[in-house]
Image (spheres, rainbow, N blue to C red):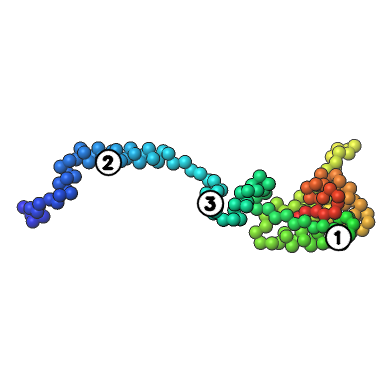
Amino acid sequence: MTKHQQQPASFLERLIFNNRPAVILICLLISIFLFYQAAQVRPQTSFEKMIPLGHPYIQKMLEHRNDLANLGNTVRITVEATDGDIFSKEYMETLRQINDEAFYIPGVDRSGLKSLWSPSVRWTEVTEEGFAGGEVIPQTYDGSADSLEDLRSNILKSGQIGRLVANNFKSSIV
């Protein structure tokens, strides 16, 4: 016999190997308990679990949750006409510059950017020949009185009053 085989077994070793059925039963019970606990785990992708709910800003946001519904990470820039309404060459040039600057801000979803200058903002109408439509601000816009009158007509046909353009025509949103 070798020296290792002659040494007496430790207490723990003897306890485990002399009581094999009890050890197997304990392992089986622990496994059943852990499987049961694993079945109770439910994945939750709740927004509230990811933010510090005790922070004052978050508490204020939760207080006004219903007012903020469906806004996501949206920034709206309101451009107001100081004199008259939005149908002036100066206002439209200012709106174009703000639209262009917002378009090139890093991280902006350019496909979601909407303003009167966006090509995705369109008007449609039913004519005798069928449907007609186009961009609210056409490629031919030059700021002249005729262009501004066409712009007014296109805005009225576009359905953007109350969305991108104020009801009183004093401001619009980018």
Distance from disc 3 to disc 1, alpha carbons, whole Å, reads: 43 Å
Residue drawn at (88%, 55%), measured in percent from left and top?
85
Distance from disc 2 to disc 3, alpha carbons, whole Å, reads: 36 Å
Distance from disc 1 to disc 2, alpha carbons, whole Å, reads: 79 Å
Q: Nearer the viewer, residue 65 or 2?
A: 65
Q: Nearer the viewer, residue 54 or 115?
A: 54
Task: Decide: few, some or many residues near mark 3? Use Cα within 10 Å; few <14, some 14-19, many ≥20.
Answer: few
Residue located beneath label 1 in the image: 82
Asked if residue 111 shows in the view, the reply is: no
Quadrant of the drawing holding the C terminus: bottom right
| Depicted 83 relative to depicted 41: above or below | below
Residue 101 pos. (x, y %):
74, 62
Residue located beneath label 2 in the image: 27
Residue drawn at (90%, 57%), measured in percent from left and top?
84
Which of the 4 image quarters holds residue 117?
A: bottom right
Residue located beneath label 3 in the image: 50
Q: Earlier in the sequence, mark 3 or mark 1?
A: 3
> Outermost residue toward the left?
1
